[in-house]
Amino acid sequence: MSAAPRTQTARVVEEPARGRVRELFALGSSGVWAAAQSIGLSYTVVALLAVVAVLDAPSASGSDGGLGAGVAVATGLWLLGHGVPLSAAGAEVTVVPLGLTALVLFTLHVAAKRSAVPTLAAWVAGTVTYAATTTTLAIALDVAGGTAAARGVQDVAVQVGAAVLGGVVMGGGGLALGMFSAPDGPLLAGIAPRMNPYLPDTLRLGMRAAVVGVAVLVGLGGLLAGTWVVLGRETASLIAGGLGPSALGTVLLMLAQSALAPNLVVWATAWLAGPGFAVGQGSAFSPAVTEAGALPAVPVLGTLPGEAWSTPYTVWAPVLVVACGAIGGWFAWQRLEPSLVRVRDVAWILAGVVLAAGGATVLLQGAAGGAAGSGELSVVGADVWVTAGLVAAEIGGGAALVLVACPLAQWWRHRDVG
């Protein structure tokens, strides 16, 4: 008779544990499903374009591309959008096509918002699934292409490590964006108070102000890059015509170049900041000097600014970046109680502005630049650290002007009233 109560007690203890396991499994599977949807959608878009391009190439070259070659190209390009270096024809490409990166983040955001339950279990499971997929594809690409032995263990390890890191950063970041924006997702406002013991609220306000300033700067970069494209459209058309693509090839060429359009926007922000950027060793595109070397026959490169863009007037372009910082400073000032603002608060805000603006610039310029091949094309993009330092100083300076001028103006008004 004594055995029955012990059995019943064991069952009572085990049932909640099993229920908890089933709940975690269900939550985690929603994250896995969201990651799988994103991978399937973004990879399919890239694969369709790459396979069609490879199969269309034999019509012009008389060679046999093959479906397998198209899949290999698609896999390499998809991984390149995650920051995984691409090895082709003995050269290594590290310039990330930010258009593909944006596509991946968009599919992750939508899939997580629609399918994932906004919980930590779902996020972890989805992130692990995504990183495992990028890692597996990177290994499979080396093995199938037969490049693992030729490149060496160290180079393969770097590529696989980049695949792991890219999968975690892209997968985790995209899924988090989707979960935060879900109707029943956790609010960012609920997370912010937990950071109070570590980051003062004024420091976080400065970081938000920096995001505003950098966003305005990117918008100006987009306008500038659009101007370059419009003014250089004839040169780009001549380059495209010289390539002699078919009608289908022309469409594919335009779509491929659209993946590099965000890179051009990021380079334009470096041009506005002052240091400019390079496309090939020895080249320079900046407000002060323009030195263009021999460029590959890529139509989008025909839209790069010429010598007419380097004048005594364009050297004042960094003033626009300072204005972006002033907009961020005004954003911060509008969220302060003027009577309670102290010097220490302003210092914390400016620290947040400088740190966040510099950090965002490092990420943007680091992803948009790198190597686009061997030889001269081993240097593409802006000098990351110089550009980040100047952008942080210029945006921080603009914010400082507003945060100092506003209290002085308020004091002067009160003085006149008194």
Image (spheres, rainbow, N blue to C red):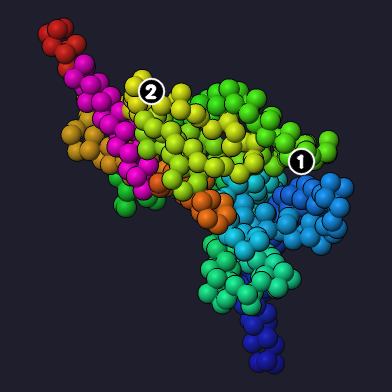
The image shows residue 371, relative to residue 391, as above or below, that is below
Relative to 369, is 39 on the left or the right? right
Give percent across and percent down for residue 405. 23, 21
Dot 2 falls on a residue whose secondary structure is: loop
Q: Residue at x 76, y 41 (%)?
A: 252
In the image, the segment drawn in magenta is: 385-410
Residue 394 location (% of width, % of height): 31, 33
Quadrant occupied by the C terminus: top left
Q: Position of residue 273 (x, y in %)?
A: 38, 33
**Residue 278 showing in the rendered view:** yes
Q: Which residue is mark 1?
A: 252
Q: Report the residue that reaches farthest toward the top.
A: 417
Q: Nearer the viewer, residue 191 or 410?
A: 410
Q: How many marks?
A: 2
* Foreground pick, 113 / 235: 235
Can you identify the residue that label 2 sits on? 311
Secondary structure mostly seen in the magenta stretch: helix
Residue at image point 65% right, 31% down:
236
Nearest the eye: 40 or 371: 371
